[in-house]
Amino acid sequence: MNESEFIEQVDCRFPYGRPLDWRRLSAQAARVSPNAAFMVLHEICRVPRSVVVSPALASAMVRHWRRRFRHPLCRVLAPVVQAYVGGAALRPAQAARLMRKVAAYPDQYNALALCYFSAEDRAGALDRLFETVTSTWDAARQE
C-alpha cells in the first residue's frame, strides 16, 4: 500500500473504539512513510466532534504511536500533541514557530497540519505560512 492509499484509508475513518485496529494502523503507518505515520497522529489528536475520546485514551494512543515511530519531528510536535490531548490551543506565534521547524522536513504535510490547526489564528498569518511551506515543498518536488 502506498502513502496516498494509506492516508485515504485512515482520513476521517480512524478506529478510535477498536484498540486492536488503531494499534495495527500505527504500526503499518510507520512502515509506509513518515507522512503516513503523522496522519495517524493527526487522527489521534484531531478527533471528530462525533467521537468521544478521553484524554487518558488519547494519551495511550499517542504513547503507542510513539513506540512504533521514530522521527526528529516527534520532539518538535510534542507541545502540539500535549495541547490537543489536554484540550488546549497554542498561541499563533508558537504554532508558527513549530510550523517553521516542520518546514525543514519536506513533504511532512500531516505534521505541518497538526501545527497549523493547533492555534486559533484570526489574522491569517498561519494560513500564509502554511501556503508558503507547502508551495516550497511542491516546487522542490517539481525540480
Image: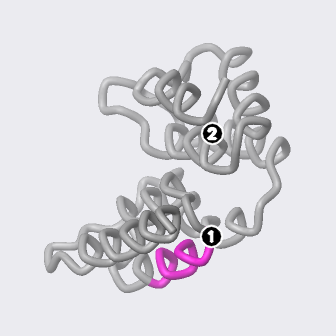
Q: Residue at x 40, y 27 (%)?
A: 12
Q: Circle 1 sits in a helix, a strand or a loop, which is it?
A: loop
Residue identified by numbered label 2: 56
Does 96 sit above or below residue 48? below
Q: Which mark is residue 105?
A: 1
Q: What stretch is highlighted in magenta?
A: 97-105
Q: Are marks 2 and 1 in contact (CB under 8 Å)?
A: no
Specify which label sits upstream in the sequence, 2 or 1: 2
Q: Circle 2 sits in a helix, a strand or a loop, which is it?
A: helix
Is residue 81 left or right of 99 when viewed as pictured?
A: right
Nearest the viewer among 42 and 36 is 36
Q: Residue at x 33, y 77 (%)?
A: 129
Does 130 sit above or below residue 88? below
Which kind of residue does numbered mark 2 sit on?
A: Ala
Q: How is the image coloured?
A: one colour
Which kind of residue does numbered mark 1 sit on?
A: Tyr
Q: Please, which residue is most extreme toward the left here?
A: 123
